[in-house]
Amino acid sequence: MVFRTEIEIKKAPWEIAYQDRIALLGSCFSDNIARKMCEFYFQVTCNPSGTLYNPISIAHHIDDVAPKADVVIITFGTAWVYVDKATNEVVDNCQKRPASDFIRRRLSVEDIVSLWQPIIKRYADKRFIFTVSPIRHIKDGLHENNLSKAILHLAVEQLIQSSISNIQYSIYFPAYEIIMDELRDYRFYSDDMLHPSPVAIAYIWQRFVDAFIGSGTRKEMENLHALWQNLNHRSLHPGSAEDIAFKKRTEEELRALQIRYPWLSKLSDSL
């Protein structure tokens, strides 16, 4: 007997490899995936201007990261936006200004698609992965949150369909469905009952790896993750002979890996 609904995720038509530069923009779910990628020393840039939630705010910063990226991962969090009454523009951050300075409105599917289709076309040489954040925005109200997520899903579907003629067409990764349908239990949430727990994040990461990363790259990941664990190891007896020998072995391992992965050179000062 099967006691849970397992989300079927097809293997992507293209893969992520270590030579790829990866940019992530969007809600804090992007931050979670970026942290997992950093544990395996992928070349990652994530939300350089801070966490972003709605499609317009994310679009404001796409030109900051996409030109130098090979893979762009976008996580839409909400369709609700705040419009500055003085400028009539959507703001990325209310900066603790009074609510009376803004008009709150919900984007439509058409708003999002008309904004993002030209972006995907402009960066047709990039591989886009779209996700919808599973984190509920309960301040919007649960019904309003559900409407918001539905709009995001419909918009992403249109964006995916419109890009299929490109050999590197955009992909949807079902992080939302994994949390809501496969891991639908509060034991997979953190203490606030809104954000996914570390166990849930690790599971979603594994499903992401299965979908986008080939077997050859996974073997490389094992070596690089072992390096990450060694560099983050905290000795019980600092300065002991065993600690000195461990650090020496780790340094030798790092030097060997730096030959193959030059971007690891910035880790030299970690030892």
Image (cartoon, rainbow, N blue to C red):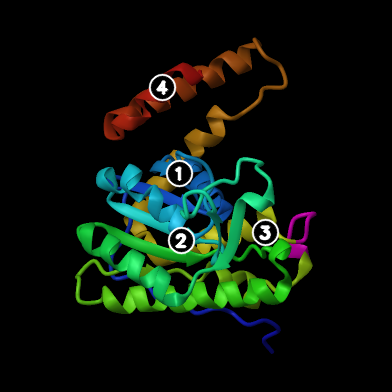
Q: How far apart, in angstroms, are the residues tagged by discs 1 and 4?
A: 29 Å
Residue under circle 4?
Answer: 252
Category of crowding for the residue at label 2, using alpha-carbon neighbours closer than 10 angstroms: few (below 14), some (14–19), many (at least 20): many
Query: Please, what is the three-letter code of the amino acid marked with disc 3?
Result: Pro
Q: Position of residue 55 (x, y in %)?
A: 46, 61
Category of crowding for the residue at label 1, using alpha-carbon neighbours closer than 10 angstroms: few (below 14), some (14–19), many (at least 20): many
Category of crowding for the residue at label 3, using alpha-carbon neighbours closer than 10 angstroms: few (below 14), some (14–19), many (at least 20): many
Query: Please, what is the three-letter code of the amino acid marked with disc 1?
Result: Cys
Nearest to the observer: residue 108 or residue 50: 108
Residue 203 numbered mark, or none: none
Figure quadrant of the N terminus: bottom right
Query: Which circle, 1 or 4, is nearer the viewer?
Result: 1
User: Which of the 4 quarters of the picture holds residue 244?
Assistant: top right
Q: Secondary structure at mark 1?
A: strand
Q: Position of residue 157 (x, y in %)?
A: 40, 78
Instruction: Decide which of tag 1 and tag 3 comes sooner along the chain.
Output: 1
Above or below, 202 against 247 in this view is below
Instruction: Decide which of tag 2 and tag 4 comes sooner along the chain.
Output: 2
Q: How far apart, in angstroms, are the residues tagged by discs 3 and 2?
A: 21 Å
Residue 196 numbered mark, or none: 3
Query: Which circle, 1 or 2, is nearer the viewer?
Result: 2
Residue 46 numbered mark, or none: 1
Instruction: Decide which of tag 1 and tag 2 comes sooner along the chain.
Output: 1
Q: How far apart, in angstroms, are the residues tagged by discs 1 and 3?
A: 19 Å
Q: Are marks 1 and 2 in contact (CB under 8 Å)?
A: no
Magenta residue span? 187-193
Above or below, 31 against 7 in this view is above
